[in-house]
Amino acid sequence: MMLRRDFVTLLGGAAAGWPLSARAQRPATPTIGFITFSSQEGATDVVAAFRKGLNESGFVEGSNVAVEYRFARNESARLPVWAADFARREVAVIVAAGFAAAFAAKAATTTIPVVFTVGGDPVQSGLVASLNRPGANLTGITGLTTEVTTKRLGLLHELLPAAKRFTALINPTSPNAQPLIMEARTASAALGLTVDMLTASDIEGIDAAFASLAENRPDALLVAGNNLFNNRRVQIVTLATHQRLPTIFSSRANAQEGGLMSYGTLGGDTIGLYTGRILKGAKAGDLPVIQEAKFEFVVNLRTAKALGLTVPTSLLARADKVIE
């Protein structure tokens, strides 16, 4: 399995070896189709990372490459339509953010390269055959959303050592749902905790979930990484704050919005780097799926104070960013 830092080293010396014939066959200004289940606001981080990687590969949007963005805003039925349209128009590459978008792109074409970014295991979900050699026309990046659940629970436990009962909010329609539930249960047992599972698969479900939390309050809440929850970031942070519920999220954007803590992958520019490499002639199926290895821990001290919590110095010392 290739880690992010290995990939950057490899990429630096690889450009000279890409065949001139492959590059010559590309149009002067290729078009990239970008699809995601998220809203434009919810996809801010991934779009920024994609553009950063694309620029590092020598492609500047609006100059020597065109990018068409499609944001489904929680309406997954749009994704297959957009993916099919990109396939019909034979764009140079389809970039798919999230499992729903990745599977829509996979179903739409077997020839156009697809670069995805997903939060769970793309092999276990059936998206690709293997990480080292995904095969077919797909490759991308995984942020291992489920595998860091243990770490998030541990951070909550360190903040609240006397707490015994936590709740995890998950989207049951996500391919990550069952692996996440299994890991949360294993991690909670190791910590001597009880973790209840709470589900929400749409906006109304989020409201209902928090209504149930108000009636049966846990000591703390873990919100799983998911496009729906990213799209409803303000809603979830507001509800958690209103209920004075200590909460840990997967994205720093949640902590910046007012969430108590976040722990998750940092980066994602591999999707732009890979897209650039494919535009220069590489085959998607020959590029290993990259496992992001850099994580970021953010603590919002303003929120901690509002909740009447004292954050241990041991946690603050390990935080990559402290919001004061």
Image (tube, grey):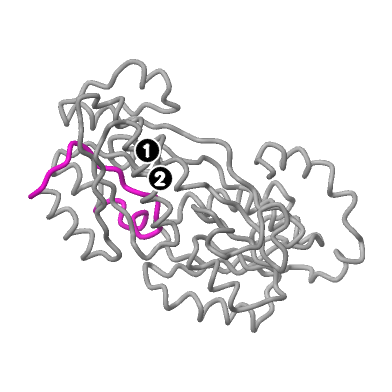
| Direction bottom: furthest residue | 88
Q: Quadrant of residue 126?
A: bottom right
Please tell me whether residue 36 belongs to the stretch shown in magenta: no
Which image quarter: residue 123?
bottom right
Task: Give the total number of marks visible in the rendering.
Answer: 2
Amino acid at pointer 1: Ala
Q: Is residue 85 above or below residue 164?
A: below
Contact (Cβ within 8 Å) of mark 1 with mark 2: yes
Magenta range is 215-235
Q: Quadrant of the C terminus?
A: top left
In the rendered structure, find residue 281 and report the number of the disc placed on it. Answer: none
Disc 2 marks a residue whose amino acid type is Glu
Q: Which mark is residue 187?
A: 1
The residue closer to the viewer here, 187 or 252, is 187
240 over 210 or under it: above or below: above
| Secondary structure type for disc 1 | helix
Q: Residue at x 88, y 67 (%)?
A: 24
Residue 218: in magenta span: yes
Q: Position of residue 138 (x, y in %)?
A: 67, 64
Residue in front for this viewpoint, 73 or 209: 209
Report crowding for label 2: few under 14, some 14 to 19, many 20 or more residues within 10 A (C-alpha): some
Per the image, the residue denoted by label 2 is 183
